Image: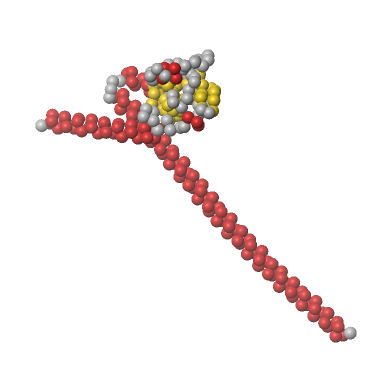
Amino acid sequence: MASKKTSKNLIRDAVIIGVGILIIWVGIQVIFGTSNPFYVVSSGSMIPELLVYDVIVVKGNIEFEEIEKGDIIVFYAPAKYDRGIERVIVHRVNTILDEDPRVIQTKGDANPRSIAGTDYPITEREYLGKVEYVVPQIGYITQILQPPINYIIIAIIIGAMVAKQVMNSRKSVTFANKIELSDTRLEKTDEANTKEQTDEANTKEQTDDKVLDQNENTVDGKKSVGEEKE
């Protein structure tokens, strides 16, 4: 009986872990806007920026038109892609060759020059996404540990990164709301101060008018007396 319960518990735990990993994976795909947000660096063409076995996190929902010189992007090598081979490259953009349609050229930081057919010409068709995060050396897990342990560990680490990003996004929204509320209160305070200053000015003007009327009456009164004496 005990062994049966143990087997059921193991199966249940495995299912829970599998479902958890699936949920994390789907959530990550939605957040980063691509079916595969993670790549393990396998060459030294981007040293020292990226090292072999670094894991890069790619955002596929950044439009190709938004890519600028200096950005690190992931794309298919155009020459091989034309032959149906999907060889993934991660290099830095160093030139915008054309804007209509947009064509860019990249270069590995450690390479002496751009390589035709690999670094250019890159169009929106070959573009996969922009590198947003780098997790140093976590790619070693895929070499040291066997599935599914390596995937579980990577999923946990990436899940923590996503959770942190979501929390930071919420903090940014909350901070923006606070600033907006503060501005609204400041505007109301300014309006109140302006109204108060206007009321004070009106009151002062009315007081000055009354004093002026009294002075005019007094002068008129003196003139009347003088005329009677004459």
User: Along the horizontal axis of the image, is 77 left or right of 202?
Assistant: left
Judge whether 91 appears above or below 21 on screen.
above
Q: Position of residue 136 (x, y in %)?
A: 42, 23
Q: Nearer the viewer, residue 24 or 127?
A: 127
**Image point 55% across, 56% down: which residue?**
188
**Image point 44% across, 41% down: which residue?**
171
Which quarter of the image is occupied by the N terminus?
top left
Q: Residue furthest top?
A: 112
Q: Residue furthest left?
A: 1
Q: Quadrant of residue 141?
A: top left
Judge whether 164 appears above or below 199 on screen.
above
Q: Quadrant of residue 229?
A: bottom right
User: Along the horizontal axis of the image, is 158 left or right of 20?
Assistant: right
Q: Position of residue 159 (x, y in %)?
A: 36, 32
Q: Is residue 132 visible?
A: yes
**Image point 80% across, 78% down: which residue?**
220
Q: Position of residue 227 (x, y in %)?
A: 86, 83
Judge whether 192 appears above or below 156 on screen.
below
User: Along the horizontal axis of the image, is 117 left or right of 40?
Assistant: right
Which quarter of the image is occupied by the C terminus?
bottom right
Q: Nearer the viewer, residue 42 or 183?
A: 42
Picture colour scheme:
secondary structure
**Image point 86% across, 82% down: which residue?**
226
Q: Position of residue 134 (x, y in %)?
A: 43, 26
Q: Nearer the viewer, residue 206 or 31?
A: 31
Q: Quadrant of residue 82?
A: top left
Q: Is residue 52 visible?
A: no
Q: Residue furthest right?
A: 230
